[in-house]
């Protein structure tokens, strides 16, 4: 999701790399789940999120959408993508336990891993910034960014995040072809290829993703 913001208003004015220390440590969010209850439809999922969630829940993305259990679809900067389906009344994440803990913490979406950090994209790369108004915890401790996000093969993960972001951005900025039918075909191709076609969750994610990226890029 593209956000057009003034970093001076939302951050501490610094940009960080994955090896930098940032004040995000919050005691494992003990007794707090407020950021999991007020996010509406903003927890947009990428292909890695789908890979991890479907492996953890032992089901398919199509099933999670069709039965409206965890996911629903929405338009993000002109492209249809899946996001976590929050409870319509409380705004609570369906993956929270009654005790307010994440039931899929080891496989939680990248958006959740990142919070309260954000990514600042420029020059076909990105850095991180701290959203100072998003988490109500005070006296947070310093944690290295890559440890906070907590993904295995972190360098490969960052490369994937970059490539997925700029793939979508380039698609959004490509010359528009007339007709809603073409737009529908593009969205259907992206959804079916990157999200609804099951991944082999016993195998490495990255070769599967890049194979699909090459396939879609050739089609488009």
Image: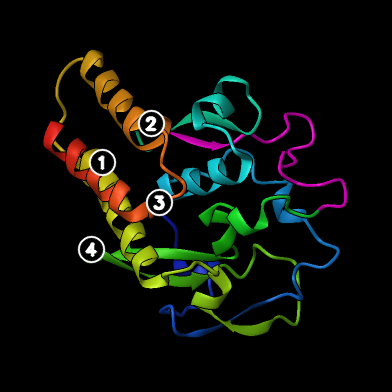
| Residue 45 in sight in this render | no
Could you tell which of marks 3 and 2 lies nearer the N-terminus? Answer: 2
Q: In this view, does 80 lie to the left or right of 208?
A: right
Determine if the magenta segment contains residue 94. Answer: yes
Residue visible at 60% across and 65% down in the picture = 116
Q: Are marks 2 and 1 in contact (CB under 8 Å)?
A: yes
| Residue 70 in sight in this render | yes
- How many residues crowd mark 4 within 10 Å: few (<14), some (14–19), many (20+)? few
Q: Do the residues labelled 4 and 2 touch (CB within 8 Å)?
A: no
Q: What residue would you read off at disc 3?
A: 203
C-alpha distance separating marks 3 and 4: 28 Å
Where are the magenta residues, as a range?
Answer: 79-100
- Camera-near label (1 vs 4) is 1
- How many residues crowd mark 3 within 10 Å: few (<14), some (14–19), many (20+)? few
Could you tell which of marks 2 and 1 lies nearer the N-terminus? Answer: 2
SS for tag 1? Answer: helix
Percent position (x, y) of residue 76? 42, 37
Q: What residue would you read off at disc 2?
A: 197
Q: Pick whichever, 117 or 109, lies toward us.
A: 109
């Amino acid at each position: 999701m593209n956000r057009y913001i003034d970093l001076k208003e939302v951050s501490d004015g610094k940009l960080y790399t994955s090896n930098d220390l940032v004040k995000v440590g919050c005691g494992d969010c003990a007794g707090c789940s407020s950021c999991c209850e007020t996010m509406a439809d903003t927890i947009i999922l990428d292909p890695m999120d789908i890979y991890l969630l479907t492996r953890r829940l032992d089901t398919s993305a199509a099933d999670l959408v069709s039965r409206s259990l965890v996911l629903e679809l929405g338009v993000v900067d002109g492209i249809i993508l899946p996001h976590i389906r929050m409870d319509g009344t409380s705004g609570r994440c369906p993956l929270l336990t009654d005790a307010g803990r994440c039931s899929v913490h080891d496989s939680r979406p990248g958006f959740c891993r990142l919070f309260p950090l954000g990514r600042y994209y420029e020059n076909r790369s990105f850095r991180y910034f701290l959203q100072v108004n998003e988490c109500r915890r005070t006296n947070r401790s310093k944690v290295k960014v890559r440890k906070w996000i907590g993904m295995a093969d972190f360098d490969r993960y960052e490369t994937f995040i970059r490539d997925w972001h700029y793939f979508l951005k380039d698609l959004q900025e490509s010359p528009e072809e007339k007709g809603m039918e073409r737009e529908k075909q593009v969205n259907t191709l992206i959804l079916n290829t990157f999200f609804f076609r099951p991944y082999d969750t016993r195998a490495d994610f990255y070769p599967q993703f890049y194979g699909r990226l090459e396939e879609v890029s050739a089609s488009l």
